[in-house]
Every structure is written in structure tokens, then in C-alpha cells.
Image (tube, rainbow, N blue to C red):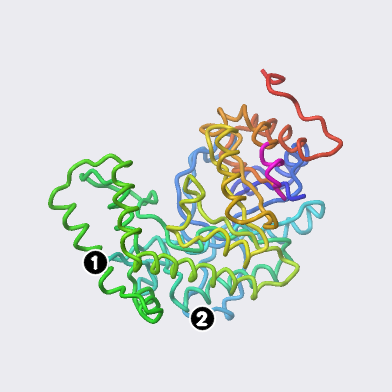
Amino acid sequence: MYKGMYTYAWDLNEEGVETVLERYRAAGINTITMAASYHAGKFLRPHARKRRVYFPEDGTVYFLPRQERYGAIHPIMNSVLSEHDFFDELRALAPDFKRVAWTVCLHNTELGVRHPEYAVRNAYGDPYHYNLCPAFEEVQEYVATLCADMAELYELDGIALETPGFLPYEHGFHHEFTLLPLNRWVKWLLGLCFSDASVSGATSAGIDVARLRQQTMDSIDHFFSNAKAVPDETAFEWWIADLVTDPEWVAFLNWRCNVVSDLVARVREAVPKATELAVIPTVQRPTAASWFEGSDLKRLAEVADVLEIPAYEPSAEAVAIDAGDVRRRVGPEAKLNFILRPTYPDLADGAETVAAAKVLKEAGAAGIAFYNYGHMALSSLDYVRDALKVFDPDGDAPQPGDRE
């Protein structure tokens, strides 16, 4: 069974591979799900030896790519590779662990700045540099080549694809700022992609995307001219009304889902059959909202080997509700992994991690992972250990109240 820990190369670099591996073994982890392609951030690291607040290099990969394999877009190598090739080191030092490459696909500001022609563009034509558009052939080729390259080089057990589609308008970009009271409806409109590839692809599918684009600009302009605060529950009804009363919107959004599913299918075809392909369809809550990113859960479950669902919820009960809905959408045969955060702000600050694990076992979870070693306090590894015992037929998971 997949029992993974999401891991960053910089944590291995500072703390030492053997130190981290011993902690994983003690907690019952059997898989290192390590960032192979990652974005920028500002991360608080409670048990770091050096930098307690860390700023990763933006949009880089943590393996040694064969650059001659790539076309219009090439991966950017992280500077740590001058000292360590961690995927290769893990192969040698940790034969008892499976290795999964956690691959952030299209959320890449550095590549978006270098290649603005391939970036998502809003209805006004403004590029969103933090998101490459999956409708471009060049972008799909890049992602498929990236995944095949690393899988072949390191004989990976698996790849976990994150952000294979269209990101929401708000995504924590540096100094993301507005003095207007944005609501769910207008953020949805601002997040829609009308890049050249999206427009041409949707038009070829028989969708009047030119009208949808003009309607989007008109609606946003109307909001800008009035700019009144609207409760999200009201804005959500506006959103639903737009979709229900205009079949063209439904066709366009389904087309986007086809684009993302086709990209994932292309990756599955490119990587070795022995490498399991998982897709993280969204980090939005609830998981059902993933359709806006082009993630149709049922279609993705059909073209990938497994869906890896973030169960980022405040309680075990909320995990049960979301997991049940995901299972309803994908059917009883689909393979599902789930990701838990055994710490603040989820699961009663970690205290309900075991309860959440029991819920996920009942939902037919094929595997479970935890996010993220570098972000959590080391004491959270106790919750990890206890949660994994739920899936051990010989284990004895503690009951609620056992831990003070």
C-alpha cells in the first residue's frame, strides 16, 4: 500500500537524507513523494537546521533532465543539482522506499515569463505568467517529455501530477492585490483562459468562444463600473445561472476538461507502464470544484492510474463528506489515494488524523499520503504513525482520546 510523505529536496539537503529516512521509517512511511518540478513560495520550516523561512528557486526541476529531448520549452535546473541528485541518491540509499516524483506541471511563473506566448490569458488578453495553458501543443509536449524523461532516468515507481490544467484567478502570486470587493462570480470570469490555443481549439469544437469572450469582458466591465460588495452565496447563484441558461458555457467548460484529460492521457502514454501515474486534480475545496481547473474527476480516473485527492479539511467528518462525493463521481472501481495534513489548520490541528484515516479506509482508499514533512512540526509524525496503523492489519490504531 502507498504510504507517502510529500518531501522537498531542500529539506533532504539541510537535514540529511539518512536523518529524514529514519524518521519516515519510524512513522511507517514507505514512499517518498518528492518534488521533482516546483514553483516559488515562502515557506515556514519549524524543524529546519538553517533557514527557518525558505524561498525556493522558482519554476525549477530537481532532477538532471536530458535537455536535447525537449522542444520549444526546456526545464530549468535547480542549483542544488550541482551538489546532489536526490532521486539518484534515494535509489541507492533507500531501496526499501518507493520513489514518486511530485510534478507541478503548469504552475510555473519562470517558464511563463520566458514563454509568454504559451501562458494563460484572460478575456482582455492579459497573460497570467504563473500558468502555462494546457491547450498549446508545445505545453503538452513539454509536460509529457518531462515526465517520460524523469521516469526513465530514475526508474520511478510513480509520478504525481499537480496543476495539469487551468489555475483559478487567485493563486497567491507575489503581492496579489486589489481594492475592489471581488466575489466568486467575477473571480470565475477573471480566471477563464482565452489564449490563442484556447480560442482556436474551442472554435474548432464548434463553440462560439468569441461571443463568450465578449460576454466575459462585458460582465467584468459592468462589475468594475459598479464594484459593490456581493456575498459569495449570491455570486455563486449568478455563476450557476450563467451556466444553466447558456449551453455554450457548458460546452466551453467541458472542452477545457477534455484538454486536461487529453494531456494526462498523453503523459500516461509517454511514461513507462511500470510507473504509476497519479493526478492531483485540485487543491480547492471541495474537490467537486475541480471542474473549473479542467479537472473532470471521472475522466481523469479513466486516463490516469489513480487520483490523489487532497483531503484538506478541518475535521474527519468533512473528510468523509468530500471523500464520499468523490467516490460517487468516479465510481466504485476507480483507484483513489488521499492526502492528509496532520497539523494546523486541518483535522482539529491534527488530533483527528486517525479518525480521518478510518474514514478514508471505509471509502476504499488505495493509498494515503501526508503533506508536508518540511512544513509540519516533528510531533506531527506521531499522528502520521498512528494514522498508518489504521491500514495495517496487524496494527492497533489508538482510539480517540488515547493521545493527550
Determine the secondary structure under disc 2.
Answer: loop
Residue in the image at 82% along x and 51% along y: 96
Q: Quadrant of the C terminus?
A: top right
User: With respect to residue 383, does 139 lie above or below?
Assistant: below
Work out whether residue 55 or residue 121 is closer to the camera in this orientation and state it.
121
Residue found at the very far left of the displayed protein: 225
Residue drawn at the location 48% of the way across and 61% of the way down: 59
Q: Is residue 260 toward the left or the right of residue 21 in the image? A: left
Q: Earlier in the sequence, mark 1 or mark 2?
A: 2
Tell me the amino acid under the disc marked 2.
Gly
Q: Position of residue 176 (x, y in %)?
A: 31, 49
Counting from the top left corner in percent of width and height, residue 30 is at 76, 47
Residue in view at x 60 percent, y 71 percent: 267
Q: Is mark 1 on a helix, strand or loop?
A: loop
> Which kind of residue does numbered mark 1 sit on?
Tyr
x and y percentages locating residue 173 in the rendered image: 36, 52
Q: How far apart are marks 1 and 2 (CA)?
A: 29 Å
Range covered by the magenta-colored residues: 359-366
Up the image or down, 326 lies above or below 389; here it is: below
Q: Position of residue 395 (x, y in %)?
A: 83, 34
- Location of mark 1 (residue): 124
- Residue holding disc 2: 71
